[in-house]
């Protein structure tokens, strides 16, 4: 018989406590202000009558700049993310302690990225603030009603975010930016490990429900910033630069996590569990082919552009 959400939360509590202890031992304290080149800053127009931002102020390539904006606006929705997981996991015991710790660590990311972008004049601060207002007013609501669905989602999403940050830093051409985003990515990796290990434990408790949750998430996955205005255009720019695309999503996000959970080696699934696993396998096969086609087309376009000089 399938376990209820309350039962799963209770049974996973000792695992949460253990993972929290592990996390606190390996997580490194860091300070956003140490990663910002403050000496590059100068007054903007407005109250201090400085210089208005102009396109030439930014030394960051367009794709990296777009990715930085998307990453920051995504981080800005932290209040909504906190609400979602606090409502699902609760605010008591080890679950509640983790929710608070995760939120506090994530809070540094938006602070640091915004400081970097403002000080280095990498983006238009007025356009950025207007975009933040619109995006945060819309908020974020999870597409997954169950605790298992949310655990599966954040396991993939934290890893995807780690990769997006690291690759954005490399694409920026700025060692300051790369160092900052590498530091943020390290946090995201630890968060991924926490959630991934929890879902692995859930697999032992209720493999059929867990398999269904994983399949539902993988087949409908979208990044949490997908409600940003112009997200489709922005994500295409990011993908064309190779910062984050379907190939990376399949090879570096989905498959490593699925292998860790050994989803295709699990025994003892009932009919519904096997059905979910088959759906997952079929979807992954299609996604792999779609990702390959995308990369092939991108390389063809690059080759044509290079040939034209």
Image: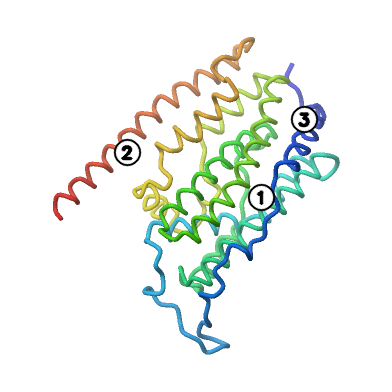
Q: Report whether 147 appears left or right of 135.
A: right
Label 2's element? Answer: helix
Q: Nearer the viewer, mark 3 or mark 2?
A: 3
Q: Secondary structure at mark 1?
A: helix
Q: Nearer the viewer, mark 3 or mark 1?
A: 3
Q: Nearer the viewer, residue 49 or 26?
A: 26
User: How many neighbours does mark 1 have within 10 angstroms: few (below 14), some (14-19), or many (20 or more)?
Assistant: some
Disc 1 or 2, which lies upstream in sequence?
1
For the N terminus, give its image quadrant: top right
Q: Which mark is residue 81?
A: 1
- Percent x, y of residue 278: 50, 18
Residue 248, given in percent of the width and then of the height, sits at 43, 38
Q: Quadrant of the C terminus?
A: bottom left
Q: Residue shown at 49%/22% (left/top)? A: 279
- Please report whichever mark, 3 or 2, sits nearer to the chain's N-terminal start: 3
Q: Nearer the viewer, residue 300 or 87?
A: 300
Which labelled disc corresponds to residue 294? 2
How far apart are the two marked residues, 3 and 1, measured between alpha carbons? 22 Å
Local packing at callout 2 (Cα closer than 10 Å; few below 14, some 14-19, many 20+) is: some
Tell me if residue 124 comes above or below residue 150 in the rendering. Answer: below
**Label 3 belongs to which residue?**
15
Q: Position of residue 125 (x, y in %)?
A: 51, 72
């Amino acid at each position: 018989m399938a376990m209820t959400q309350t039962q799963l939360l209770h049974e996973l509590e000792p695992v949460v406590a253990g993972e929290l202890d592990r996390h606190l031992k390996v997580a490194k304290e860091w300070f956003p202000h140490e990663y910002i080149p403050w000496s590059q800053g100068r007054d903007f127009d407005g109250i201090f009558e400085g210089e208005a931002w102009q396109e030439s102020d930014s030394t960051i390539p367009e794709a990296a700049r777009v990715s930085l904006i998307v990453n920051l606006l995504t981080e800005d929705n932290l209040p909504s993310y906190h609400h979602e997981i606090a409502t699902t996991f609760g605010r008591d015991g080890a679950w509640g302690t983790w929710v608070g710790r995760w939120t506090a660590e994530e809070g540094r990311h938006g602070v640091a990225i915004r400081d970097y972008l403002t000080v280095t004049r990498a983006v238009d601060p007025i356009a950025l603030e207007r975009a933040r207002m619109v995006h945060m007013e819309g908020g974020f609501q999870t597409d997954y009603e169950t605790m298992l669905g949310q655990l599966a989602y954040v396991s993939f999403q934290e890893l995807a975010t780690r990769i997006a940050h690291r690759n954005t830093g490399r694409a920026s051409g700025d060692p300051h930016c790369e160092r900052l985003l590498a530091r943020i990515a390290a946090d995201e990796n630890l968060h991924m490990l926490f959630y991934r290990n929890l879902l692995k434990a859930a697999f032992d408790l209720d493999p059929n429900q867990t398999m269904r949750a994983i399949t539902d998430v993988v087949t409908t996955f979208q990044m949490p910033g997908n409600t940003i205005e112009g997200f489709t255009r922005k994500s295409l720019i990011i993908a064309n630069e190779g910062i984050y695309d379907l190939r990376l999503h399949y090879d570096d996000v989905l498959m490593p996590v699925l292998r860790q959970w050994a989803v295709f080696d699990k025994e003892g699934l009932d009919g519904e569990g096997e059905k979910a696993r088959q759906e997952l396998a079929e979807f992954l096969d299609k996604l792999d082919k779609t990702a390959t086609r995308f990369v092939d087309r991108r390389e063809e376009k690059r080759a044509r552009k290079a040939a034209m000089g």
